[in-house]
Image (cartoon, rainbow, N blue to C red):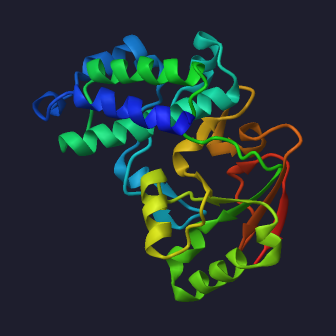
């Protein structure tokens, strides 16, 4: 129900959104002076730096990283709420840029999106909703990008009894939510009711508000307190994945 409400809100907001002409240029003075909501974002990454060394990939779409510390202090958000905000903000902004055929959104329009998404998060609306089942099986899917051999291994895991004992979740450090959903369908890997964790949910600030070396995600904060998490991976767990979970190698 929450996902349906979120989708309807995106549609209604999109119908009155900015035109292509509006998206031609940003006022960089606003950025460097820290005016308005700009203070709640980190500097945009150059395209060459938008990659994942663990996923061995360059990402097609940029991430608009939230300044998680400022966000949480200014708006009394917990870690989970702040991460959901970043995910939903990036999800909607990417959609608007695609519709407008533009590379950036002017700061004025970005501010409108900012407060719209903030209100939704505080209202309990989520793009990633935690499974009702208390066991979640998270499979790190980026290995399938390396070829048919890895794809075959992933299919074997998905069809195994041990994977079937938990709620299926696909995680990617290389693809955003739209790309991940599309790729899973194209490769016939999608499972009905499965959840997605994409790179828009990782942030360079830890749970205590400290800036760390790489974008990380505290997985347990997305789930209920007593939920059990199992991560299925073809190699060692990346340092980006934080929290308490058990590892299942394949």
Would you identify the image quadrant in which residue 22 lies?
A: top left
**Rendered location of residue 168, percent (x, y):** 69, 61
Q: How many marks?
A: 0
Question: As displayed, is residue 190 above or below residue 243?
Answer: below
| Residue at the spot 77% in from the left edge and 70% down from the top edge | 163
Please state if 212 lies on the left or on the right of 186 as rendered: right
| Between 49 and 146, the one nearer to me in the picture | 146
The N terminus: image quadrant: top right
Residue at 56% over, 73% down: 189
Q: In this image, 248 relative to 104: left or right?
A: right
In the image, residue 127 lies at what x, y percent? 54, 39
Q: Is residue 234 above or below residue 89?
A: below
**Left or right: 99 in relation to 59:** left
- Asked if residue 29 lies left or right of residue 94, the reply is left
Residue 96 pos. (x, y %): 29, 37
Q: Position of residue 246 (x, y in %)?
A: 86, 59
Quadrant of the frame with the C terminus: bottom right
Name the residue at the right extreme: 226
| 8 and 230: which is toward the camera | 8
Q: Quadrant of residue 70?
A: top right
Which is nearer the eye, 10 or 99?
10
Position of residue 77 relative to residue 195, above or below, is: above
Instruction: Report whether residue 44 is seen.
Output: no
Q: Is residue 165 visible?
A: yes
Q: Is residue 243 above or below residue 88?
A: below
In the image, what residue occupies the spot 65% across and 13% down?
76
Residue at (43% x, 63% y) in the render: 182
The residue at the far bottom in this view is 149
Q: Which residue is situated farthest in the front direction here? A: 1
- In depth, the one of 53 and 108 nearer the eye is 108
């Amino acid at each position: 129900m929450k996902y349906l409400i979120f989708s309807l809100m995106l549609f209604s907001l999109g119908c009155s959104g900015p035109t292509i002409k509006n998206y031609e240029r940003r006022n960089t003075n606003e950025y460097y002076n820290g005016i308005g909501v700009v203070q709640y974002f980190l500097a945009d990454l150059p395209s060459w730096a938008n990659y994942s060394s663990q996923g061995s990939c360059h990402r097609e779409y940029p991430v608009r990283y939230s300044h998680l510390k400022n966000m949480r202090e200014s708006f009394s958000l917990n870690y989970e709420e702040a991460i959901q905000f970043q995910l939903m903000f990036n999800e909607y902004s990417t959609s608007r840029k695609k519709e407008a055929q533009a590379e950036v959104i002017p700061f004025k329009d970005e501010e409108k999106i900012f407060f719209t998404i903030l209100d939704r998060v505080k209202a309990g609306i989520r793009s990633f909703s935690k499974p009702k089942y208390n066991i979640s099986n998270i499979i790190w899917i980026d290995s399938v990008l390396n070829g048919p051999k890895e794809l075959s291994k992933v299919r074997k895991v998905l069809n195994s009894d041990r994977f079937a004992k938990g709620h299926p979740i696909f995680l990617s450090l290389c693809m955003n939510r739209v790309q991940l959903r599309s790729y899973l369908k194209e490769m016939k890997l999608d499972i009905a009711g499965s959840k997605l964790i994409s790179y828009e949910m990782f942030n360079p600030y830890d749970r205590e508000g400290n800036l760390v070396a790489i974008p990380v995600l505290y997985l347990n904060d997305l789930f209920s307190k007593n939920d059990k998490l199992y991560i299925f991976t073809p190699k060692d767990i990346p340092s980006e994945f934080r929290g308490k979970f058990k590892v299942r190698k394949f």
